[in-house]
Image: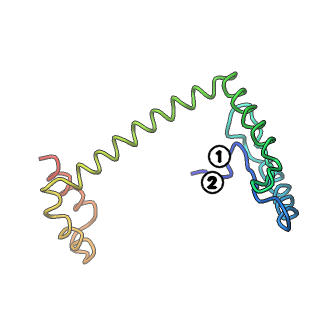
Amino acid sequence: KKGIIEISDALVFNKADGSNKQKANIAKVEFANAVHYLQPYAKDWQVRVLTASALTGDGIDKIWEMISEFIKLSKTNNSFIEERKKQSLQWMHSLIEESLKNSFFNNPDVKKDLKEIEKQIISEKILPTVAADILLKRFNN
């Protein structure tokens, strides 16, 4: 799995005002150097690192400019649409998984024996693979 930095299209250090301004600028430089070595996550895009202050409004215009530029580029190279398609498939899979999980754990036959089977796993009387097989058979019958 990739970390948050590796899948970011941009990093914004907020609260770059007052006594935090210098720290935010140092962090910006350090992260800009780090992301420079990473493979860009988005097609044809280099990760940007910015500072901003929601309090004073400094840098907000640059953030919006960058977002607009990213969207324009993503639509031009079709990665925006492709990403939306991928997200739609992931969403569908997620909904199916959640529905199956709810159906499984709300199944009366599973609910009836789940606690006892969990106790057997904890007391090492039964292997998790065997327990899963038992519960899945109850669910499917």
Q: Position of residue 10 (x, y in %)?
A: 72, 45
Q: Is residue 61 above or below residue 120?
A: above
At numbered mark 2, what does the secondary structure look like: helix, strand or loop? loop
From the top left corner, tell me how far across and down residue 116 is, in percent.
Answer: 17, 70
Mark 1 Cα-neighbour bin, 10 Å: few <14, some 14–19, many ≥20: some
- For disc 2, the marked residue is 3
Residue drawn 25% across the image and 71% down it: 121
Name the residue nearer the viewer: 21 or 111.
21
The kind of residue on which mark 1 rests is Ile
Residue 103 image label: none
> Mark 2: which amino acid?
Gly
Residue 83 spot, x, y in % from top left: 57, 32
In the rendered image, residue 71, in percent from the top left (x then y), is placed at: 69, 30
Is there CB contact under 8 Å for labels 1 and 2? yes
7 left or right of 30?
left
The image quadrant of residue 124 is bottom left
What residue does disc 1 label? 7
Q: Nearer the viewer, residue 93 or 138?
A: 93
Instruction: Say which residue appears at 81% left-offset and 58% top-offset.
Output: 16
